[in-house]
Image (cartoon, rainbow, N blue to C red):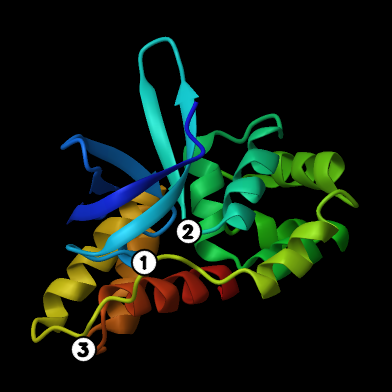
Amino acid sequence: MFEYLKGMITGVYPGYIVLENQGGVGYKIYPANPYHFKVDQEAQVYIEQIVRETELSLYGFATLTEKGLFNKLLNVSGIGPKSALAILAGADPAALVAAIDQDEVTYLTQFPGVGKKTAQQIILDLKGKMSDFENLARQEPAIGGQMTLTANDNQNLTDALEALTALGYSAKDVAKVKKALAGEPGPTEDLISKALALLVSA
């Protein structure tokens, strides 16, 4: 139904953002990393609408490449929207394509919601079908804005840990990240990137 929504970001939370359009409607949107966006930022967010029996949800993406990868992942049996977002949050497109084409089951199982069987299914369904995304990812700039450094770095880390929980990472994983990044300065978006790098390389 929607290709994209354009408007003002009025809320950024660990699991979602709120985008208000010119009509005064605030849309609750689930992106891979909400902290790619910031409050009072004008943004255009590419949208995928998921309709289920008991819910209607909007998933948002900074680029068409990200949206395309999300839809590719949804075509895999055992991968739902939440798992697809967690994969997108933790892997750049080139690394994801390489992992699938090189049968790297271990790499894929490091994402929440992806066991060995599901990782094998991802490879079976998508191997050799995603090379176009690798080139697009290098050419297409992200639309999301950058978070600026705030004085409260502890709050930034708290927000980053809550974002990991929203993506489906376990309490054990979140605790490990909290210990590794304790006292680490920086905006929430950077802390999330560092946390995901730690989890994926573990």
- Identify the residue shown where x is 31% and y is 57%: 163
Quadrant, the C terminus: bottom right
* Discs 1/2, front: 2
- Identify the residue shown where x is 23% and y is 54%: 8
Tag 2: amino acid = Ala
Instruction: Report crowding for label 2: few under 14, some 14 to 19, many 20 or more residues within 10 A (C-alpha).
Output: many
Callout 1 touching callout 2 (CB < 8 Å): yes
User: What is the C-alpha distance between the residues marked 3 and 1?
Assistant: 21 Å
Precedes in sequence: disc 1 or disc 2: 1
The label shown at residue 62 is 2
Does residue 77 appear to the left or right of 17 in the view shown? right
* Discs 3/1, front: 1
Q: Residue furthest right?
A: 128
- How many labels were placed on the picture? 3
Instruction: Report crowding for label 3: few under 14, some 14 to 19, many 20 or more residues within 10 A (C-alpha).
Output: few
Does residue 78 appear to the left or right of 98 in the view shown? left
Q: Position of residue 188 (x, y in %)?
A: 27, 74
Give 83 or 70, whichever is nearer the viewer: 70
The label shown at residue 36 is 1
Question: In the figure, residue 93 lies in which quadrant?
Answer: bottom right
Q: Position of residue 132 (x, y in %)?
A: 81, 58
Q: Residue furthest left?
A: 151
Give 165 or 150, whichever is nearer the viewer: 150
Q: Provide the residue designation for mark 3.
A: 183
User: What is the C-alpha distance between the residues marked 3 and 2?
Assistant: 29 Å
User: What is the C-alpha distance between the residues marked 1 and 2?
Assistant: 8 Å
Callout 3 touching callout 2 (CB < 8 Å): no
Precedes in sequence: disc 3 or disc 1: 1
Tag 1: amino acid = His
